[in-house]
Image (cartoon, rainbow, N blue to C red):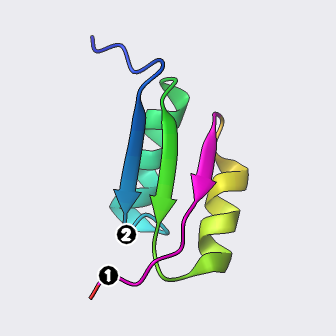
Amino acid sequence: MTDWQGKRYWLVGASEGLGAALAHKLSAAGAEVIVSARNEARLAELVAALPGRARAVPVDVR
């Protein structure tokens, strides 16, 4: 099994669906998670719900 402790991952499109699910898995495994998407409110909700270190960086990737 991979050791995710101390690793940092930046997930784009993470405010819902697969991105949010992956953020939960990585956070629960000990990784620091940076989540990005257009919807700042959903990102804030996601960061509050994650069990580990996380922060939101709202972006619109075009």
- Residue drawn at point x = 28 percent, y = 15 percent: 2
- In this view, the residue in front, 2 or 58, is 58
- The answer to if 18 sits in the magenta stretch is no
Q: Residue furthest right?
A: 48
- The answer to if 60 sits in the magenta stretch is yes
Span highlighted in magenta in the image: 52-61
- Residue drawn at point x = 39 percent, y = 50 percent: 10
The numbered disc on residue 13 is 2
The numbered disc on residue 2 is none
- Residue drawn at point x = 52 percent, y = 23 percent: 30
Q: Position of residue 12 (x, y in %)?
A: 36, 64
- Label the magenta part by its dominant secondary structure: loop
| Amino acid type at mark 2 | Gly
Please name which of the two marks, 2 or 1, marks the residue nearer to the observer: 1
Q: Position of residue 8 (x, y in %)?
A: 43, 35
**Is residue 12 visible to the viewer in this orientation of the structure?**
yes
Query: Taking 15 as reference, is 11 left or right?
Result: left
| Amino acid type at mark 1 | Val
In the picture, the quarter occupied by the C terminus is bottom left
Do residues under tags 2 and 1 come within 8 Å of each other at their CB atoms? yes
In the picture, the quarter occupied by the N terminus is top left
**Is residue 22 visible to the viewer in this orientation of the structure?**
no
**Which SS class for mark 2?**
loop
In this picture, is 6 found above or below 51? above
In this picture, is 54 found above or below 47? above
**Total numbered badges shown on the rendered structure:** 2
**Which SS class for mark 1?**
loop
User: How much space separates mark 2 and mark 1, taking CA atoms?
Assistant: 9 Å
Query: Taking 51 as reference, is 17 left or right?
Result: left
The numbered disc on residue 61 is 1
Q: How many neighbours does mark 1 have within 10 angstroms: few (below 14), some (14-19), or many (20 or more)?
A: few
